[in-house]
Amino acid sequence: MKDLIQLQSIDRSIIEKKSYLKMPHNLPVLNEEDPIVDLYKYGKKHLDKIKASYSAAQSELDQINKALSSAGGFKSKIRTNVEYQTYKEKLELLSHKRSVLADRVKDLAQKMTEEMIGLSKLEERITENNKSSDSATAKYIARIESLKSDVADLYRKRRIIVQVMDNAIYELYMSLINCCEGLVVVEAMDRVCKGCHLIMPRDVYLNVLSLARIEHCPNCMRILYHHNHLM
């Protein structure tokens, strides 16, 4: 009877562990739909636009600075007041544009810095989330490998028990395992079957106590034992 109970315990452990192995598990893996990743992508596109605007403004500012630098050469060629007035207006216009562009370049540079700082913080969060995800995945893989090892060890123990068990008893156990939902051997206590909770006839309970033969519950057909048999 001890062998039967031990075999059942092993089988139930195998079923439990294999059920976990077959169960789908949702790991916290960062994916393309993650809000942080989405926010980072949006910020990156926005930063690229600012960089493009900054480059265009800086290029235009460089051209104006060159024009102002070369304006001195034209001054010596002025012959009339009209030409001088035109020259003066052009310088004022270029100076105004330079002032406006310089402010714009400065503003865009500041915005680029702010955006890069924000993106850097988002990158740190994404990195931390990836680390957490990697850690959770590693723990899950370790758990799965441990369970596989446990199942293999349980099967080894099962084979040892079956080898020394009477074939007729083993076949009886296997014939009941499906209809009894994996609980074939149950305790009988005070004439009550712990499998279906039926109060059994006195003679059946006495046979269980004496262990004269393998006794079944009249209702659920499970094999009955008494805790004294385990001592």
Image (cartoon, rainbow, N blue to C red):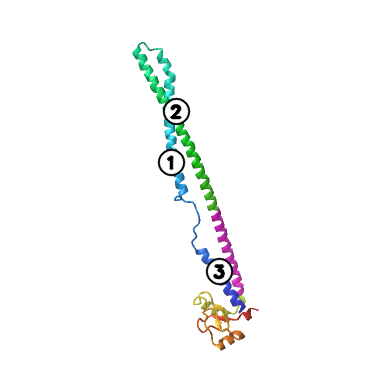
Residue on which the image places disc 1: 45
> For residue 102, which numbered disc appears in the image?
2
Residue on which the image places disc 3: 14
Q: Nearer the viewer, mark 3 or mark 2?
A: 2
| Image quadrant occupied by the C terminus | bottom right
Label 3 to label 1, Cα distance in Å? 53 Å
In this rendering, the answer to whether 115 lies above or below 4 is above
**Upstream in the sequence, badge 3 or badge 1?**
3
Disc 2 vs disc 1: Cβ atoms closer than 8 Å? no
In this rendering, does residue 162 appear at all?
Answer: no
Q: Secondary structure at mark 2?
A: helix
Q: Secondary structure at mark 3?
A: helix
Determine the main secondary structure of the stretch shown in magenta: helix
User: Farthest residue in the bottom direction?
Assistant: 203
User: What's the amino acid at mark 1?
Assistant: Lys
The residue located at (46%, 36%) in the rendering is 111
Residue 143 belongs to the span the image colors magenta: yes
Q: Residues within 10 Å of mark 2 (few under 14, many from 20)?
A: some
**Upstream in the sequence, badge 3 or badge 2?**
3
Q: Secondary structure at mark 1?
A: helix
**x then y, percent, for residue 137:** 54, 55
- Give the residues drawn in magenta, as a range: 135-161
In this rendering, does residue 62 appear at all?
Answer: yes
